[in-house]
Image (cartoon, rainbow, N blue to C red):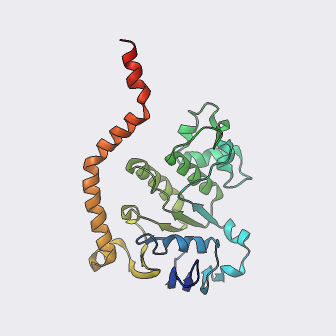
Amino acid sequence: EFENVFFSYTQGSEILKDVSFTVLPGQTVALVGQSGSGKSTIIRLIFRFYDVQGGCIKIDGQDISKVKQSSLRAHIGVVPQDTVLFNDNIRDNIRYGRVTATDQEVEEAAIAADIHDKIITFPDNYDTQVGERGLKLSGGEKQRVAIARTILKAPQIILLDEATSALDTQTERNIQASLAKVCTNRTTIVVAHRLSTVIGADVILVLRDGQIVERGRHEELLEKGGLYSDMWLKQQQAQDSDSASDTETKDRKSEKLQPQTSTAGHKGH
């Protein structure tokens, strides 16, 4: 619960101005708005990277500024925009979500996050080294590691910060399905650019310049014909023009990834 929250990173420029909202247990709340509107700041404040400068944030009626950071964070799972992998094997990278987890629990989390099948194709399965000095994982695979960590942690509250923005549409769809599994019956706060990913949210909060200007479900907000419905229409139009050029871009991408094959083919002749 946010009660009249004010916050600024630097003096004089307020990022959040008098923000109030309540998330009920098990609800999914989406934060949308232009970049710089304060969405990610809300996530950072819940995780207590910073403390509020006015008002307060409560979880289960407790002011979080009066709780130890470590005990607060034990109840919160974060799927960040860019997942950090340690120079270690993939098993321990997932186990980071809960270091006491057994190997079996790690594998079950990987299955739920839809990355198990991929891991068993790696040279040493779960013992494969990843990170800077090991196997490089794609953006989608890293996201799945983050999801598997969160599944292992089994937190009461999940924070998703633009978790799928760096992925192509198909990967994003698959990952959305894995995320939906994790978030069922858990209180979830999601920051989203692509509005199509939050159609099912219980409440959508629309932020502009650090204030909530609209709130409601997807259909209600479309009917209002305000900022949300503008954003929705713009994204739909952009998507229509994108999908036409999408296949072209994908073809180009796959060609870029395999420059050797085309030249190797000619050498034999």
Q: How many marks?
A: 0
Q: Where 52 sits versus 231, above or below?
A: below
Q: Which quadrant holds the N terminus?
A: bottom right
| Image-based side of 212 in relation to 112, left or right | left
* Residue lying at 40% horizontally and 61% vertically, measured from the top left: 197
Residue in the picture at 45% in, 82% down: 211
Asked whether residue 105 appears in the rendered view, the answer is: no
Q: Nearer the viewer, residue 84 or 21?
A: 84
Front-most of residues 4 and 120: 4
| Residue 9, image x, y percentages | 58, 77
Location of residue 133 by image quarter? top right
Q: What residue is rendered at 53% in x and 38% in y? A: 117
Residue at 68 percent of width and 71 percent of height: 72
Rendering coords of residue 153 (x, y %): 65, 58
Judged from this view, the residue extending furthest toward the top is 269
In this picture, residue 129 sits left or right of residue 19: right
Split into 4 quadrants, where in the image is the C terminus? top left
Q: Position of residue 260 (x, y in %)?
A: 43, 26
Q: Looking at the picture, does residue 30 appear above or below residue 154?
A: below
Residue 37, horizontal then vertical, whole percent: 45, 75
In the image, 144 versus 50, the foreground residue is: 50
Answer whether residue 64 is visible to the viewer in this image: yes
Q: Quadrant of residue 259?
A: top left
Position above or below: 44 against 115: below
Q: In the figure, residue 262 lies in which quadrant?
A: top left
